[in-house]
Amino acid sequence: MVLGAVGIVFGDIGTSTLYAMSAVLQADTSRGDAVARPLVYGMVSTIVWSMMLIVTVLYVRLLLRADNDGEGGLLALVGLLRQRLAPGRVLAVVSLLGVFGAAMFLGDSVITPAISVLSAAEGLELLNPSWSHVVVPFAFAVLVGLFVIQRFGTGRIGRLFGPVMVVWFASTALWGALAVAKEPSALEALSPHWIFLYFRDEPLIAFLSLGSVVLAVTGAEALYADLGHFGRQAIARAWVFVVLPALVLSYLGQAAAVAGSSTAVGNPFFAIVPGWARLPMVVVATLATIIASQAVISGAFSVVHQASRLGFLPHLRTTHTSRRQARQIYLPAVNWTLGLAVLAVVLIFRSSASLASAYGVAVTSTITVTTLLYLTYRWRRDGSVSPGFLVGAAILVVELVFLAANLPKVRSGGWLPLGMGAILVLTMTTWRAGQRRIEAARADAEGPVEDLVPRIRATEAGLARVPGTAVYLTRGPGVVPIALDAMLDLNHVLHTTTVLLSWESVDVPAVRHDERVVVDVLDDPTDGIVHVHATFGYRERPDLLAVLEQAIPLAEGELDHVDLDRAIYFTSVPVVKFSPRSGMPRWRQRIFLTLVRLSPDPVDVLRLPRERTISVGREMPW
């Protein structure tokens, strides 16, 4: 498990050594010669202690313990809070924070592959300066290949992630240790007193550099998001015993190189790699950045999947790429949208240094939102000011300073994640608001299920009972679906066995199999009407055919004769058009209607047999 965690969880933060130190040095662009030793040690000390504070204390020590039924991540934290908060302003603010954090994470998912692969490709320039024109095409080709292979899943190549990342961390630690051996005084940078001297002597440079120091903790969110995959102990051990020592040695080695030579300032990571090892190191770095990018892409798939389960995005076509691992999924629409965005970013910015500003804003925003949600959770859980709350609050103050240091970078690239985040927040909140209006309209149009049996008996003389089984999908328990209402009113037909099938997603990652299905035989069993309700976690994909199979033995014999291979399925489709009464501006209605049109067919999403499925539509006055 530790090897797996090293390979998958720490790819992003592990490859930050490629560009973080270089980005921090950009804050001191006024100096043409080697950067002064106290300044370098102050920079590296700030990086090391930022990792200790944010990654070790906040994420490993605190956040990994805030799990939602074993799952972690920003949306899992939102799910925890939704379980503890009553509907109201606080819950609305928490949901909005969660949406913003998820949006910034998706923005991060665009920048991470671009900056990671570009930073690895830039090692080619050190091998031969005339190869500088090859960097962007090389990175472009690697990224195209990365997104093309997503549809095959990561099951097979995923086995190589651990060994490759172990080689990466071992080599970065080795080159760092060798550089420190040549300049042992670099070990002094471990002392936090250099941070005090740094801010005392160069306050402006120190403050501005914080906007890039935060790049050293990029990928910290992956520790929390992958909690359900590897568990707290495996992630913590991998960080403490493998990743953290390697990162510290690499940064100390870069400090030694920069303090001793002005030529190392441009690319301090490759400056500590011996000339004979640079080409192999470019290869290893490229593989490591591909792994880091893969982890972020998979994380984006998971976030979008969870957001759709929680009602913030429409359901998207999802393919499970592994028979053994249910969480290995592929979303074609997300993959190609993400891929085009990443390639566009590479062509626009063309270097890792240019992307550093954008990356810092994305990372800081995501971490700050996560900490705010964690503090809200601890306050609600503990009911008082606990030690964990106080530590988290102190770290939040530090994060707000990081955030302030990134504000000047908005014009030089920080606009990118903020712009993407704003678009995604608008999209998710518009979908949520529109769906609530549609649900309210459907609630008015669909009558209570308690009135169904009396209604059938009152019209029994003119009602034809057709042999066979009809399964009506309904939006929730207790209502008569539009399709069944139409069959009764327009066709005056009812099958001898009628199943009302409803389901819901709840704020836990997964639901136990024996708690998934509830069956209720309505009124007299001879009426042949059965209600089946299923519950799924937000990480699970509804499998309604499996639900029906599970419901048969629970229906008191009412469904024993049902042949699911011959049953007919009915779906209710609300038809939505522009409405002056919706209370939503016309431009926002246009966004919502576009999302509705882009939503996949429920028949495909729910994996229903198309040849035996009938969709009934009705215009909804929303």
Image (spheres, helix red, strand yellow):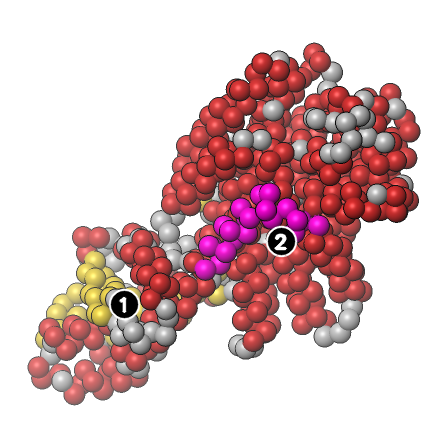
| Amino acid at circle 2 | Ser
Query: Secondary structure under badge 1?
Result: loop
Q: Residue furthest top?
A: 276
Residue at 58% x, 43% y is: 413
Q: Is residue 560 above or below residue 123?
A: below
Q: Is residue 562 above or below residue 201?
A: below
Residue linked to disc 2: 365
Query: Secondary structure under badge 2?
Result: helix
Residue 420 inside the magenta-drawn segment: yes
Q: Quadrant of the N terminus?
A: top right
Distance from the alpha carbon under mark 2 to that under mark 1: 35 Å
Give the image location of residue 47, x and y in percent.
77, 41
Residue linked to disc 1: 578
Q: Nearer the viewer, residue 589 or 286?
A: 589
Quadrant position of residue 206: top right
Q: On the rendered structure, is 492 left or right of 90?
A: left
| Amino acid at circle 1 | Phe
- How many residues crowd mark 2 within 10 Å: few (<14), some (14–19), many (20+)? many
Magenta-drawn stretch, dominant element (helix, strand or loop): helix
Q: Is residue 363 visible?
A: no
The segment highlighted magenta reads 405-426
Give the image location of residue 408, x and y in percent.
66, 49
- N-terminal-most mark, 2 or 1: 2
Quadrant position of residue 187: top right
Give the image location of residue 286, x and y in percent.
58, 26
Residue at 67% x, 31% y is: 18
Q: Is residue 394 visible?
A: yes
Q: Nearer the viewer, residue 269 or 285?
A: 269
Q: Is residue 273 above or below residue 547?
A: above
Q: Are marks 2 and 1 in contact (CB under 8 Å)?
A: no
